Amino acid sequence: MKSTYKLIDEKTWDRAMHCMVFRNSVEPAFCVTFEADITNFRRKVKKQGLSFTMAMVFAVCKCANEIEAFRYRFVGGKVALFDRIDTVFTYLNKDTELFKVVNVPMTNDLKTYCELAMKTATEQKEYFTGPLANDVFQCSPMPWVTYTHISHTNSGQKDNATPLFDWGKYYEKEGKTLIPISVQAHHSFVDGLHIGQFVDKLQEFFDRGSKE
């Protein structure tokens, strides 16, 4: 099912001034890296025989979808709020060591999403299937490095408000499994407050891992 959006009347929108200020910044996006406890979540994913990478894509995109600020985009120069955001992720071709960019619609269920995402990623032959749609979250796992900071290339398109999610190599510490996660978002729509809400929702989702 295709996602839909509604245009925002910026004359009556509470965030209109903030949006305008950040939209005209030289670098309108900002990036935050944090550490999450995935002990329960990893156990659940392993028990169900699911791909950890696909499960992470589902987790971050599910939680981001629940926060309105992450669903705003610029459409034709105007501010729009989407009802649902789908997923895009990078998937490594181990034979060539080049990655594919894979588009998968968001679903309501972890297992359903993981199976669909894995099928789509393995069957896709092209590295790129075309320009990214506006209504996606972009995920790039980097499981080779337990990083403390990450940066991204800048397309130079100030109206590109697609949030970017990354995560690195998880590790064990004091009986817990921890992982670095990064989120980059357009400051016209997303503030530190919203990043905090995302972090809390995501950790809550991870913590429920052994209880579902």
Image: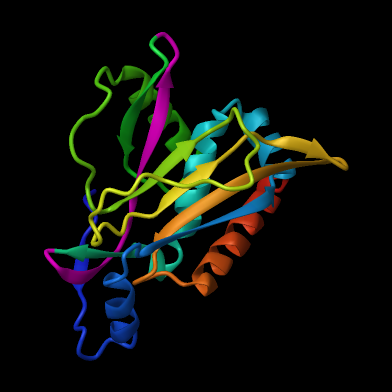
Front one among 97 and 63: 97
Query: Measuring 88% from the left and 43% from the top, which residue is drawn there?
Result: 174
The quarter holding residue 98 reads top left
The vertical placement of 151 against 123, above or below, is below
| Residue in the image at 32% along x and 49% along y | 154
Horizontally, residue 163 falls left or right of residue 147, namely left
Q: Does 31 sit left or right of 161 as displayed?
A: right
Percent x, y for residue 102?
32, 32
Camera-side residue of 155 and 173: 155
Residue 76 in which image quadrant: bottom left
Q: Position of residue 33 (x, y in %)?
A: 58, 53
| Magenta portion: prevailing SS class | strand
Q: Residue furthest top?
A: 95
Which residue corresponds to the image point at 36% horizontal and 71% vertical from the top-left? 189
Nearest the viewer among 31 and 133 is: 31
Percent x, y for residue 46? 66, 29
Q: Which residues are magenta?
A: 76-95
Examine the structure image and report whether residue 42 is included in the region drawn in magenta: no
Q: In the rendered image of this protein, does residue 115 appear above or below residue 191?
A: above
Residue drawn at x 57%, y 32% is 52
